Image (tube, rainbow, N blue to C red):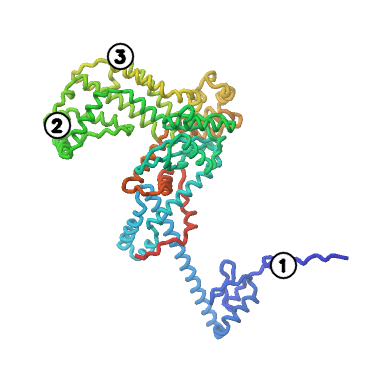
């Protein structure tokens, strides 16, 4: 018995049917986007087949349009075509205006987030836009009224923008070869502990991504165990594998660096369980520098300076009189500065301003009936001048350690340079050479005696403090120096795992020439590293690890300033989710939200208000 083959079903596309121009006049059809469309009712026919078009015309429109013949019929077709195209243009224009309104809503929401304004500010901004439009371009006022900027809409827009940035970060994370994190914790206006976690990763092309990973509200305890759990959750949510985790930088609090139960200890225990190497744990270099500066006691100076400033500024009348006094004598400065303990640069700035205004402060205080004998004491004034000079140099160092995207090797170089300066200053002070101490020199030029022994001891104590506190960075000094300049490093001082590759690298004239071209340019260092051949696996791995390390928790501190501005006593009810969204949008550096993609999913969401 023979089996017949099943019949092959014919496809419409295989027939290659084409629309014929004569059908326009015969059946009132045109071809729009490759689909036959009726000019009369705008209904579409799936297949450009004459039978289908004829049947549609005969059953629906022939009774009314059969009377048109010849030129009259051609004119009727042209008229209907014009109406149809005009209608299509209208819908295109409406769609374009709707898209523009949604895009404008997102753009304004980004600006509101970055400015730290309340979500309700969107409504005020819209009123301003409408008022300006009614004056400048009244015919376009309706388009501005379509921009939705209600408080709920702005909050939703910022959440969308934050989610988009986080999604982009998660995509970047998939390409990370290694990564490190920086953590710090603060308490907001509602006494909620906020844990900031920043991630910095390097991919195979030596491109660095540095972004906020998570802001975690901790309503309960802030123990090391709880922080560790939050860190694990953040890793899991973002898809960060533990095997690529190489470094952690903290503020040095006991809950972070405790040897047995601190966060670093728990992280290394987890790494050990996974059969992985321990992470490189660093104590924020800026915090350590600030702690080093606290060994400069001089309580007799600071207590009196703060007391004088408080006497002047704490009472409104006296403060106004002091500023008027400075204006009257045409002083270079208009006021003294308040001292704020938690601000890194406050001490140096306050002391320098007070020293510059010491004569004015003395004259004003005595005029006001207050006795200030210390402002006439040569020994006290010299202590003040020395403290002004040394805190100024500490402030210069602090500023160098700040900044986004700074390499850990460059930060440690700044600390090493300062330690070398301390040695120079100690020797120069022993010889009463005050070329680097302008405030002290100005007093000596006016006849004040200088006794160097006490100040040399202070410099020595500061130097010892720097050597002690930066021990964790010193352990990695060789690695940092190889990273900064692998061609000048002594191979014998390098760890054995790098020595063979380092010799090969230093003898490669082509790579050496390329490195010299980008030397000192951090933004172009990756360009050189990308050209390293596969024959340097250990050096490449070390370069990536060093590039991804955080030298400080500066980004966390910067985030906390933005946090306190957004969650203030006037805006304390902002939710944790909205707070994180605002901070992610306002602090994002390398990633920008894809507004065009977000607009596609929100096309219909325009404002219904017509003002």
Front-most of residues 224 and 240: 224
Q: How would you rate the neighbour count of disc 2 (Cα within 10 Å): few for under 14, some for 14-19, many for 20 or more?
A: some
Residue 364 bears which disc, if any?
2
Could you say where residue 282 lies in the image, as x and y percent from the top left?
46, 29
Q: Residue furthest right?
A: 1
Question: Which residue appears at 40% of the width and 40% of the height?
Answer: 193
* Residue that mark 1 sits on: 10
Question: Which residue appears at 50% of the width and 77% of the height?
Answer: 79
Does residue 448 appear anywhere in the picture? Answer: yes
Quick check: 69 above or below 20? below
**Where, by quadrant of the figure, is residue 587 drawn?**
top left
Could you say where residue 526 lies in the image, as x and y percent from the top left?
51, 35
**Where, by quadrant of the figure, is residue 503 drawn?**
top right
Report the Cα–Cα distance between label 3 and label 1. 102 Å
> Mark 2 falls on what kind of element?
helix
Report the Cα–Cα distance between label 3 and label 2. 37 Å
Q: Nearer the viewer, mark 3 or mark 2?
A: 2
Front-most of residues 219 and 398: 219
> Mark 1 falls on what kind of element?
loop
* Residue that mark 3 sits on: 430
Front-most of residues 250 and 590: 250
Report the Cα–Cα distance between label 2 and label 1. 103 Å
Q: Earlier in the sequence, mark 3 or mark 1?
A: 1
> Mark 3 falls on what kind of element?
helix
Q: Are marks 3 and 1 in contact (CB under 8 Å)?
A: no
Q: Earlier in the sequence, mark 2 or mark 1?
A: 1
């Amino acid at each position: 018995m023979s089996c017949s083959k099943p019949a092959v079903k014919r496809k419409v596309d295989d027939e290659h049917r084409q629309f014929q121009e004569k059908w326009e006049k015969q059946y009132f059809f045109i071809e729009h986007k490759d689909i036959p469309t009726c000019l009369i009712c705008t209904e579409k026919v799936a297949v450009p087949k004459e039978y289908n078009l004829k049947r549609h015309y005969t059953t629906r429109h022939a009774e009314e349009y059969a009377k048109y013949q010849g030129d009259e019929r051609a004119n009727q077709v042209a008229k209907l075509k014009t109406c149809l195209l005009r209608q299509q243009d209208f819908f295109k224009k409406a769609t374009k205006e709707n898209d523009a309104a949604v895009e404008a809503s997102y753009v304004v929401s980004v600006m509101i987030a970055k400015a730290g304004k309340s979500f309700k500010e969107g409504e005020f901004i819209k009123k301003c836009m409408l008022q300006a439009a009614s004056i400048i371009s009244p015919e376009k006022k309706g388009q501005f009224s379509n921009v939705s900027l209600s408080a709920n809409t702005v909050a939703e827009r910022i959440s969308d923008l934050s989610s988009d940035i986080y999604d982009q970060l998660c995509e970047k994370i998939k390409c990370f070869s290694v990564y490190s994190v920086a953590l710090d914790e603060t308490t907001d206006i509602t006494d909620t502990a906020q844990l900031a976690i920043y991630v910095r990763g390097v991919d195979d092309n030596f491109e660095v991504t540095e972004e906020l990973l998570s802001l975690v509200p901790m309503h309960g305890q802030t123990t090391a165990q709880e922080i560790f759990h939050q860190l694990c959750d953040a890793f899991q949510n973002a898809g960060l594998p533990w095997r690529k985790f190489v470094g952690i930088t903290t503020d040095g609090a006991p809950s972070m660096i405790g040897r047995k139960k601190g966060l670093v200890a728990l992280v290394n225990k987890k790494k050990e369980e996974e059969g992985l190497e321990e992470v490189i744990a660093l104590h924020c270099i800026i915090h350590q520098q600030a702690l080093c500066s606290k060994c400069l006691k001089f309580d007799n100076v600071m207590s009196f300076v703060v007391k004088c400033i408080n006497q002047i500024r704490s009472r409104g009348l006296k403060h106004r009189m002091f500023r008027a006094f400075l204006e009257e004598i045409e002083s270079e400065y208009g006021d003294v500065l308040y001292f704020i303990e938690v601000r890194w640069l406050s001490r140096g700035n306050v002391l320098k301003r007070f020293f510059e205004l010491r004569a004015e402060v003395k004259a004003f205080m005595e005029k006001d009936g207050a006795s200030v004998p210390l402002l006439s004491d040569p020994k006290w004034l010299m202590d003040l001048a020395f403290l002004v000079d040394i805190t100024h140099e500490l402030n210069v160092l602090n500023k160098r350690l700040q900044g986004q995207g700074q390499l850990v090797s460059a930060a440690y170089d700044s600390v090493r340079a300062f330690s070398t300066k301390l040695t120079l200053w100690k020797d120069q002070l022993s010889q009463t050479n005050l070329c680097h101490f302008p405030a002290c020199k100005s007093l000596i030029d006016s006849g004040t005696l200088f006794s160097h022994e006490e100040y040399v001891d202070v410099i020595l104590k500061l130097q010892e403090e720097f050597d002690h506190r930066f021990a964790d960075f010193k352990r990695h000094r060789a690695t940092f120096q190889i990273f900064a300049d692998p061609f000048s490093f002594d191979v014998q001082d390098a760890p054995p795992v790098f020595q063979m590759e380092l010799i090969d690298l230093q003898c490669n004239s082509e790579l050496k020439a390329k490195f010299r071209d980008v030397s000192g340019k951090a933004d172009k260092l990756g360009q050189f590293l990308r050209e390293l051949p596969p024959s340097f696996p250990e050096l490449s791995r070390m370069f990536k690890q060093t590039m991804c390390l955080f030298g400080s928790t500066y980004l966390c501190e910067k985030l906390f300033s933005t946090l306190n501005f957004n969650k203030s006593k006037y805006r304390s009810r902002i939710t944790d989710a909205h707070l994180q969204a605002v901070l992610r949008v306002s602090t994002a550096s390398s990633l920008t939200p894809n507004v065009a993609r977000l607009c596609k999913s929100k096309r219909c969401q325009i404002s219904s208000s017509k003002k």
